[in-house]
Amino acid sequence: MTPRVGDLAPDFRARSDDGQDVSLAALRGRWVVLYFYPRASSPGCSVEARAFETALPEFERRGATVIGVSTDTEAKQALFRDRCGLSFPLLPDGDKVIARAYGAVGVVGGLLNMASRRTFLIDPGGRVAHVYRVLNVGGHATEVLADLDRLRAEQPARASLS
């Protein structure tokens, strides 16, 4: 089942294509952009990844970590990183544990059991702040940045209501 806004985001621990241990729990206190994509090095996934890389300094300035996840192998992820010049973590999820926890496994382009194109914006407390199901790969990073700005501005107001 796909986590909804307000739900605690499912925790995960995985090794990225470049050997980093990445876990959601270790990122508490930071915003996290967890984006799933169907296939490393495909045209649409490459456009989306490069857009996130271009916007990465802006995400970092806002205290956000970007993580990409697909069901591709570590070797395919590493090749994708090199081809696109990416510096953020890419998680190979061949066993689909992370994708299933986020409801992001499905039929993509007629192929079964690939990661669906889906993004989760997770707040510093580990809760889902926004879910993107239908997106434009070229403008998606910009859309997430705008929502991150809006949600960060609302955060102090939410805390004072508690």
Image (cartoon, rainbow, N blue to C red):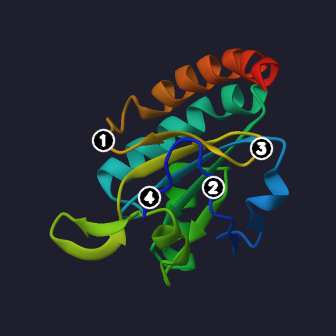
Q: What residue sits right under mark 1 in the picture?
A: 134
How much space separates mark 4 and mark 1, taking CA atoms?
A: 14 Å
How much space separates mark 4 and mark 2, taking CA atoms?
A: 10 Å
- Name the residue rendered at 52%, 30% in the picture: 144
Judge the density around disc 1: few (<14), some (14-19), many (≥20) Cα neighbours within 10 Å. Answer: few
Is residue 126 visible in the rendered image? The answer is yes
Q: Earlier in the sequence, mark 3 or mark 1?
A: 3
Q: Position of residue 103 (x, y in %)?
A: 42, 64
Task: Identify the residue at the far left of this view.
Answer: 110
Residue 56 appears left or right of 1: right
Q: Position of residue 47 (x, y in %)?
A: 39, 42
Q: Is the residue under label 1 in contact with that under label 2 (CB below 8 Å)? A: no
Kind of element beneath mark 1: loop
Kind of element beneath mark 2: loop
Q: Amino acid at mark 4?
A: Thr
Q: Earlier in the sequence, mark 4 or mark 1?
A: 4
- Name the residue rendered at 35%, 60% in the picture: 116
How much space separates mark 3 and mark 1, taking CA atoms?
A: 25 Å
Q: Amino acid at mark 1?
A: Val
Judge the density around disc 4: few (<14), some (14-19), many (≥20) Cα neighbours within 10 Å. Answer: some
Q: Nearer the viewer, mark 2 or mark 1?
A: 2
Q: Position of residue 6 (x, y in %)?
A: 59, 42
In the image, residue 149 above or below residue 59: above
Q: Looking at the image, which is closer to me, 43 or 36? A: 36
Q: Earlier in the sequence, mark 2 or mark 1?
A: 2
Res 125 label: 3
Q: Locate residue 54: give its quadrant.
A: top right
Res 9 label: 2
How much space separates mark 3 and mark 4, taking CA atoms?
A: 18 Å
* Quadrant assignment for the N terminus: bottom left
Q: What residue sits right under mark 4 in the picture?
A: 2
Is residue 78 visible in the rendered image? The answer is no
